[in-house]
Amino acid sequence: MSNSNWFEKIPSWVWWSLTPYFGGFSFIYAGWKIKNNRWVLWGIVFIFGSIITGGFIGSFSNFLILIMPLIQLATAFKFKQEFLVKTAPKNILISSLEIAESIAKYRGKIDINNCSQDDLVYGLGLPIVYANDLQLLKEEGYMFTHLEELVDLVGIPEQILRRIEPLIIFTYDINKETDISWRRLNSLSIQELVSHGIDDVNAEKIVSERNQKGAYKSLLDIKKRTGIPINIYRHLV
């Protein structure tokens, strides 16, 4: 089955759970596959539960024997999504917000500032060209704080980021930033900004806004407060 509809498939072990008496083995298999001991325990409970109910006599016993496989099947469908997420290929297509939320729930989120390039490509499904640019900015000392920065600085289309947003977090450690950083915009004078290639008008606007309302928190904060496009001071990152 192709990656595009991976999360729509029904694993064969789900149907095995319908097997009278032995359907519990499907949970043991699935639990072993994703290293979930709780599922293994469920399988053991179902197996012994089926054996015990089979020893009863009368119509109630027949009812239990009939209903047990249905309970097992309902439980298997409840567990199915977690199984698919944990066994999904590394390069799985994250085609919707709902899938991203499921992956985040069972696999965890990816920290943009501390992840590897493989995490960006295989964990988030970003095209390699964006992963390369993002990694380069990180290596040069930039710390990301908002999704919008990934749009403005890296050029990742907003629709892609909105789709994978549940998978992304930003942890921030100011000690990891180098001196070659946007934070210089919080200390450089008008003359120094001009010497770094910022025109007089924008340099004065950056310093004036900073003096009136305090230090900038990110490149996005600079853009919102001054109205100056990021590409004007992108080279200072």
Image (cartoon, rainbow, N blue to C red):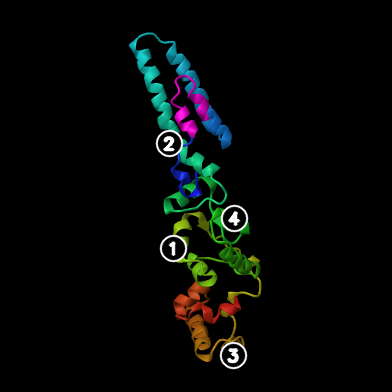
Which three-letter amino acid code belongs to the residue tagged 4?
A: Asp
Distance from the alpha carbon under mark 4 to that under mark 1: 19 Å
Residue to which mark 3 is pinned: 191
Task: Compare marks 3 and 1 and give the one earlier in the sequence.
Answer: 1
Is residue 37 visible in this depiction of the protein? no
Find the magenta span and give its range.
12-27
Task: Compare marks 2 and 1 and give the one earlier in the sequence.
Answer: 2
Near mark 2 (Cα within 10 A), the count class, few <14, some 14-19 or many ≥20, is: few
Nearest to the eye among marks 3 and 1: give it: 1
Q: Residue at x 45, y 65 (%)?
A: 158
Q: Is residue 94 above or below residue 10?
A: below
Secondary structure found at label 2: helix
Residue to which mark 1 is pinned: 159
Distance from the alpha carbon under mark 4 to that under mark 2: 28 Å
Secondary structure found at label 3: helix
Task: Compare marks 4 and 1 and give the one earlier in the sequence.
Answer: 4
Residue to which mark 2 is pinned: 78
